[in-house]
Image: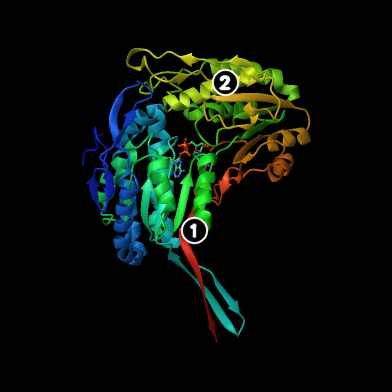
Amino acid sequence: MNLTAPEFISNYIGGEWVKPANNKYLDNTNPATGDVYSHTPDSDATDVQKAVDAAKAALPKWSKTSLEDRFMILNKIAMLIDEHLDELALAETNDNGKPLWLSKRVDIPRASSNFRFFATGIMHFSTESHNMEDRAINYTLRQPVGVVGCISPWNLPLYLFTWKIAPALAAGNCVVAKPSEVTPMTSYLLTHICKEAGLPDGVLNIIHGTGPGCGSAIVAHPEIKAISFTGSTRAGKDIAAVAAPMFKKISLELGGKNPNIIFEDCDWKKMMNTTIQSSFSNQGQICLCGSRVLVQKSIYEKFKAEFLQRVAALTVGDPLQDTSKQGAVVSKMHYDKVMGCIELAKQEGGTVLAGGHAVRGTGRCENGLFIAPTVIEGLGPACRTNMEEIFGPVVTLQSFETEEEALALANTSDYGLSATIWTQDVTRANRVAAKVQSGIIWVNCWLLRDLRTPFGGFKNSGIGREGGWDALRFFTEPKNVCIEL
Ligand code: NAD
């Protein structure tokens, strides 16, 4: 099997590669070069209906397929992803603009880990039993939900797409999935892997298109019983408004504005190396990036001087070059949004200490969408720059004196996805971790992921948790059976 990016991407319905019913396509642009290099189906409700029909037809057999057979197929998908690492990584980089070394090291390996993790996970998934002494025994059945919808964003395209579809499939559901229209290629290539691995036709259907044109048709479809969504808080709100009156199960993984809290007693070298990563990895386009850097006053000036030096050394440029630490941001629309946020920060009185401007690419990247890593100081916690998600290579610096002040700054946010705490004092680490209003806390590390742990946010960062048993519970319906003895 040779995975090559086609000029026209197809939908994948009932095991066939098909055109959108309306024959309309969207341009697919490489953000590092500005070239339109392929076209994505601009699907609508007609295509979604066909996908639902195919999923319904496949459901009776797939939901009864033995756990061992499901394991074998999903594990084979993981192996094939590994075998095709180079083609998938290149496709991811061409769609997204991220450095190729990052796609190879993180995005694609994580996609195969997702399949491997849930392939084995389903073999160990057990259900509860509640014994009422000698009166009765209850046991819980966990049956597949049925046809489920999975909708994912552009920042970690295959990584987050597979994070949803792997547990959905492992739990015996049939899936109608939509990747982001901005980065469709790797999910298209995945369809060839699924076919080769023997995933039965109709079990996974992938429809390409926009949120309003295609995603909303998935959300509103009465026969899609659960929606697993990762994306913006704005879209999450719209989805909740449609799904709630239909009593659908929903899992919403939304935006973040994460604090990175640095105390004076931190392990300096480790903190500095990791803070550069947590600020700017993937051009700051990771929902878990620490975009609000909070530094204890006693080390603020020292931190600032060294941080700015390190930021200046981050090479921005052609994502195909190993030397590029930062690639392009994902699209013109997103580029304009991030540049607009930098302007807003200036208007709010912020001082740009580093970056704040576009970077002109060279050679094939002359028309690429590059933004210099940007550091801003001088803004209070409640201004728009510190409250709204930018989702680009932009961080702000704020200082605090006491632990209470640090907590107040950290929790001045409508979001609550993740937080990072840097201190060598384990008692303080535990105390602060318990009080920060976020679903994921890292102490003296960042993005260290155990796939068994609950993943998700407080407040406007979402509803529900992904990962481990949480994901398998989401994609199954519990049914209690009580037997009187
Ligand atoms: P987005 O909300 O614009 O789009 C996400 C996906 O939803 C896309 O596939 C899009 O086509 C679709 N969509 C948009 N509106 C829809 C609607 N009304 N109904 C159904 N589908 C719809 O988000 P994005 O710009 O692709 O991604 C960036 C956002 O994702 C950021 O806010 C980021 O924080 C968030 N994110 C969150 C997590 C997390 O785990 N919490 C992870 C990654 C990204």
Q: Quadrant of residue 345?
A: top right
**Mark 1 element type:** helix
Image location (x, y in percent) of residue 262: 68, 30
The residue labelled by disc 1 is: 246
The residue labelled by disc 2 is: 342
Mark linked to residue 108: none
Residue 303 visible to an observer of this rendering: yes
Q: Nearer the viewer, mark 1 or mark 2?
A: 1
- Disc 2 crowd, CA 10 A, few/some/many (<14, 14-19, 20+): many
| Residue pictured at 66% horizontal, 18% vertical | 350
Residue 452 visible to an observer of this rendering: no
Image location (x, y in percent) of residue 252: 52, 48
Tell me: 37 left or right of 286.
left
| Residue pictured at 69% horizontal, 41% vertical | 436
Tell me: 318 left or right of 413.
left
- The amino acid type of the residue labelled 1 equals Met
| Residue pictured at 35% horizontal, 64% vertical | 63
Residue 359's place in the image compared with 450, above or below, is above
Image location (x, y in percent) of residue 430: 70, 44
Look at the numbered discs 1 and 2 and tell me whether their residues touch, using CB distance below 8 Å.
no
> How far apart are labels 1 and 2 at the CA level?
40 Å
Query: Nearest the camera: 84 or 380?
Result: 380
